[in-house]
Amino acid sequence: MAPNPAETTAEPPAGTPADASVRASGRLKPVLGVTAVILLTVSCITPASSLFIIVPELLATQGSGVVIALLLGVVVSIAVGACYAELGTRTPSSGGEYAMITHTIGRTLGWLTFALTAALLVIIPPIIALGTADYLGSIAHLDRATTGAVVMLLATCTAILDVRANAFVTSCFLALEVRAAAVVAFLGFAHAERPVSTLVKPEALTEGTLSPFTLGILMSGLVVAMLIVNGFGTASYLAEEMIEPRRDVARAVFASIFIAATVIIVPTAAVVLGAGSLRDLGVLSFPDFVEAWAGPGVAAAVSAGIALAILNAVIVMVLQNGRVMYASGRDRAWPAPVNSALTRLHPRFHTPVVATLVVALPGAVLAYFVDIESLLGITGVIVAAVYLLLAFGALAVRRTPHAGWKMPLWPLAPVVVIISLTYAVSRSAPVDLLITAGIVAAALGYEVLYLRRRRSTRFVVDARADR
């Protein structure tokens, strides 16, 4: 089927000089050094938010084996990070995962990757934002939905600013959240009730009762354990704005994983050792432990630090999510008017203002009107699916030579990812698998009915081969 004439006149066909000019003028400026990218990436991981929101879910089942579960999650994340690093240096584009996959294993799987990540772009930030009111509850009574929506709007306004200004703002917030985690670690170790051997000879929790820590229990927590450092892929989203992406994407990925894992695992170990009873791990929150150790004043200060960590995470998520939508417009994934709007840059800050609003404002609406946390279960499945696609991309990337970073011991890392995540996903709830399958079906329908019929003018993904 021939391309729609109205659309081909609105935009020049791919490969023409005019098309090249449009692409060049629509590119983001490379202004970030590796330190700024690491700060932004760690802020997106937001280790304090993972520590205070995700770790308690693991404590409720893993018990004193939570540190082993977290370490296993980090090991798998390092393997995934190796895939991000190699693919990201080969394809330094704001499109992130979908650009990497498109240029290694094809357009159809590349579009599917975009669809899966797009679902996460809208769902995850408001879920995180809703936690702000929970942790400010000891300081002030706030309506949860309203607070979540306000956090989304504040993050949106900040994300539209110059990316270097965002790096400064998020680094300030990051310093505060790391201090909050350090306070928990210090107090936990100072009030230790049991020896360090508890961490390597653990007991799990089954409905509040201590039980043997088995391999099955460990693997049941793997998907959630991986989420604690989820966000290290931000380095690949920012690759287009990095001064030396070929050299620094890998550095930013691995440094971010190491920093975030340290900030999360050390305080978690301290809580396991300092809890009055191992059964308390399944029922008390981190501020509860802090209050028991140091009083309500310190607990309130830590809670404020957690709230800032959440805001920090949402800012960076909105910032990176806007860039993904911007890239989809630049790569012509949509009808011409939509592509034109998504690629519009702010005249002063040179940031994708429309694309940022497109992903952020629905998040504010969802936070206020929808029980979006009911969708939390599918996020782990979608993240795992994206990681699996990246692993297959990392297996295929060596088919053609590239100038970027190359992972050692290839193909060990992608094979580890494929084996571990296939097993983990197989243990997911059927409803989460069905919802993910529905997203896949809708994405493939759009690809077959619209994109495939316009191969020369639609979803022409920029590999940034000139960088």
Image (cartoon, grey):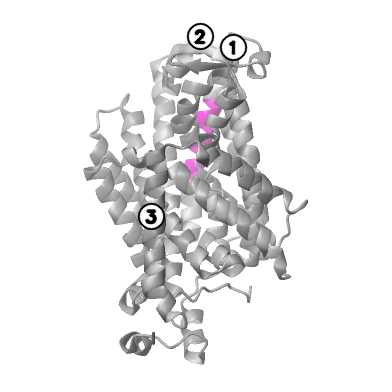
Label 1 belongs to which residue? 192
Badge 2: residue crowd in 10 Å (few <14, some 14–19, many ≥20): few
> Identity of the amino acid at label 3?
Ile
CA separation in Å, label 1 and label 3 = 47 Å
Label annotation for residue 457 = none
Residue type at mark 1 is: Ala
Q: Which numbered mark, 1 or 2, is in the foreground of this view?
A: 2
Residue at mark 3 to residue at mark 2: CA–CA distance: 43 Å
Disc 3 is placed on an element classified as helix
Q: Main secondary structure of the magenta part?
A: helix
Note whether 95 is above or below 47 in the view shown: below
How many numbered marks does the figure carry? 3
Label 3: which residue?
Answer: 439
Q: Earlier in the sequence, mark 1 or mark 2?
A: 1
Residue depicted at 45% across the width and 18% down the height: 282
Q: Position of residue 58 (x, y in %)?
A: 50, 27
For the point 71% across and 70% down, which residue is it?
400
Q: Position of residue 57 (x, y in %)?
A: 45, 27
Q: Which residues are magenta?
A: 172-183
Say which element carries label 2: loop
Relative depth, front residue between 300 and 50:
50
Residue 431 included in the magenta stretch of the image: no
Quarter assignment of residue 424: top right
Q: Residue at x 46, y 30 (%)?
A: 52
Magenta stretch containing residue 180, yes or no? yes
- Discs 1/3, front: 3
